[in-house]
């Protein structure tokens, strides 16, 4: 379900992250190479990023397939950021197809994307979420418990729903937190920054596959990987 990526480093255009690479999110929206659940990601797309000298992240989301959005394609080359999260969506069966159900979600400070699924019954009731979809409710729960505790939250939810897939990407503009629980994740350290993604957007041999049930902490100083265990 879904493909996503996050960037932290020197300013890059959104096109260079999401559209231009040979296997970018644009291609992954209709022909992913590593996706284990679902075939296409045509139920919407979104991007969130931190503009220079702006106090909060901004987002552009749509319920249309990424390949159909010519407005984004025309502006993406000139939109740049030091930190961004992009996603293309394959909706969980039974979930609404609407803009508010598309990642990234935000609390006004953090951005968060979910690749996977979770039984909504495993989440607390009365969450202040953007949508009734599982990913939006999960994001609201992570924001409520604190993104710094994202690893603990994932492990606790996995115990409540053993079939859950909980690959999360979260950023506050200064670091990236990423979990693997039931789906693929890779990262690439480049000279000007670090990208974390569901699957490589090119064939660079330096991509590192992250084992399942791990949490990554990414800063400009490097990548730290820690094991996650169910609570």
Image (cartoon, rainbow, N blue to C red):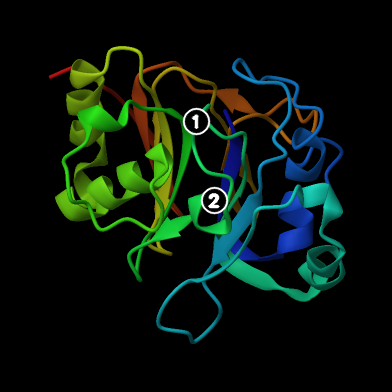
Q: Judge whether 225 appears above or below 86 on screen.
A: above
Direction from residue 98 to residue 73 in the image, left or right: right
Check residue 59 in the rendering and tell me which mark sits there, or answer none: none
Residue 219 vs residue 230, the one in the foreground: 230
Check residue 94 in the rendering and tell me which mark sits there, or answer none: 1
- How far, Cα to Cα, is label 2 from label 1? 15 Å
Q: Residues within 10 Å of mark 1 (few under 14, many from 20)?
A: few
> How far across and how far down the image is residue 214, in percent?
35, 24
Per the image, the residue denoted by label 2 is 102
Residue 50 visible to the viewer: yes
Using the rendered view, name the quadrant where residue 197 is placed: top right
Q: Judge whether 182 appears above or below 25 on screen.
A: above
> How far across and how far down the image is residue 122, in percent?
22, 28
Q: Residues within 10 Å of mark 2 (few under 14, many from 20)?
A: many
> How far across and how far down the image is residue 8, in percent?
53, 56
Residue positioned 23% across, 29% down in the render = 121
Using the rendered view, name the quadrant where residue 99 is placed: bottom right
Direction from residue 66 to residue 8 in the image, left or right: left
Q: Quadrant of the C terminus?
A: top left
Residue positioned 42% across, 42% down in the render = 133
Task: Point out the residue furthest to the bottom here.
Answer: 53
Q: Secondary structure at mark 2?
A: loop
Residue positioned 72% across, 39% down in the render = 42
Task: Point out the residue furthest to the left here.
Answer: 231
Mark toward the start of the polypeptide (2 vs 1): 1
Q: Secondary structure at mark 1?
A: loop
Residue positioned 52% across, 29% down in the render = 92
Residue 28 vs residue 38, the one in the foreground: 38
Direction from residue 217 to residue 161 in the image, left or right: left
Direction from residue 82 to residue 178 in the image, left or right: left
Q: Judge whether 73 appears above or below 163 on screen.
A: below
């Amino acid at each position: 379900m879904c493909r996503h990526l996050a960037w932290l480093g020197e300013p890059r255009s959104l096109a260079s992250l999401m559209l231009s690479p040979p296997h970018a999110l644009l291609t992954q929206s209709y022909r992913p190479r590593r996706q284990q659940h679902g075939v296409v990601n045509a139920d919407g797309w979104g991007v969130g990023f931190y503009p220079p000298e702006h106090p909060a992240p901004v987002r552009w989301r749509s319920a249309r397939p990424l390949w159909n959005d010519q407005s984004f394609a025309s502006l993406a080359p000139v939109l740049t950021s030091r930190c961004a999260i992009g996603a293309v969506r394959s909706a969980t069966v039974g979930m609404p197809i609407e803009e508010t159900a598309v990642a990234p979600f935000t609390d006004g400070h953090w951005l968060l994307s979910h690749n996977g699924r979770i039984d909504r019954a495993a989440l607390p009731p009365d969450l202040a979420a953007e949508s009734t979809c599982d990913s939006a409710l999960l994001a609201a729960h992570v924001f409520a418990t604190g993104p710094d505790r994202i690893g603990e939250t994932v492990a606790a939810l996995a115990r409540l729903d053993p079939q859950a897939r909980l690959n999360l990407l979260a950023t506050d503009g200064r670091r990236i937190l990423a979990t693997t629980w039931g789906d693929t994740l890779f990262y690439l350290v480049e000279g000007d920054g670090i990208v974390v993604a569901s699957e490589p957007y090119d064939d660079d041999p330096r991509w590192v596959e992250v084992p399942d049930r791990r949490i990554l902490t990414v800063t400009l100083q490097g990548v730290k990987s820690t094991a996650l265990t169910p609570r």
